[in-house]
Amino acid sequence: MKSFLNLLTAGMFLAALVGCLPSPSDTKTPGTKAGGGHDDHDHGAGPHGGTIGEWGGGKYHIEFTVDHDQKEAAVFILQEDAKSAAPIKAERILLTIKEPAFQVELVAQPLDGETDGVSSRFVGKHDSLGKVQEFAGSITGEIEGTPYAGDFKETAEGHGHKH
């Protein structure tokens, strides 16, 4: 009985250890952008000079930009090509920054030609956005009842900052 318990304990330990190992889809290679989707690759700078991430496994893309002088972030919702605007019917989305940890509610600020309650641009202010650094975090929102979330990480080469 004692050997059975030892074997059971060892098996549970091994199962817990294996469960903590990253899967191949969780690992990132240098130079990739975090996107939380199947297509985790470097998209380069976005059409507004910002950092690109994925929403919905690449169905949409998000572009994070920051203006330090204005302490303001703008996030653009882009189509699958990561270049064209994808206006959505939403009043706000949520920006979560990892370090220093804070959240900003970004409010719809439609671009020219975006009407009928849709917007591809969302803007918000926070004092911590005035700090010049490479930001990393996530952007969450809802499109037609479906929740979307995507990660982004600025790099020194392309960070979408305006000074």
Image (cartoon, helix red, strand yellow):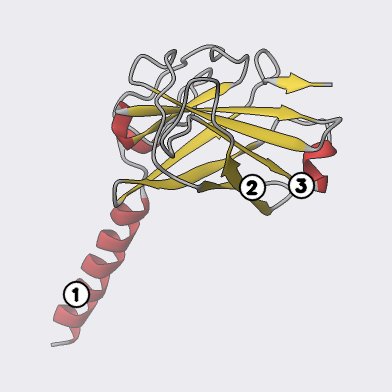
Secondary-structure class at tag 1? helix
Q: Which label sits in the foreground, 3 or 2?
A: 3
Residue 61 in the figure: left or right of residue 3: right
Kindly identify the amino acid type of the residue bearing the numbered disc 3: His
Extreme residue in the bottom direction: 1
Judging by the rendered image, the residue that carries numbered circle 2 is 98
Q: Residue at x 37, y 54 (%)?
A: 20
- In this rendering, the answer to whether 27 lies above or below 8 is above
* Residue ID for mark 1: 8
Alpha carbon distance from label 3 to label 1: 52 Å
Disc on res. 126: 3
Viewer-side residue, 25 vs 123: 123
Q: Which comes sooner in the sequence, label 3 or label 1? A: 1
Label 2 element class: loop
Per the model, the C-alpha gap separating discs 2 and 1 is 39 Å
Say which label, 2 or 1, has the lower sequence index. 1
Tags 2 and 1 touching, CB below 8 Å? no
Q: Residue at x 37, y 38 (%)?
A: 26
Mark 1, Cα crowd under 10 Å, few <14 / some 14-19 / many 20+, is: few
Foreground mark, 3 or 1, reads 3
Please name the residue shown 63% across and 26% down the image: 154
Q: Is residue 52 visible?
A: yes
Q: Which quarter of the rendering shows the N terminus?
A: bottom left
Foreground of the two, 81 or 53: 81
Residue 140: horizontal and vertical position, in percent? 46, 47
Viewer-proximal residue among 79 and 102: 79
**Residue 155: image location, x then y, percent:** 65, 22
Left of 48 or right of it: where is 116? Answer: left
Which kind of residue does numbered mark 2 sit on? Lys
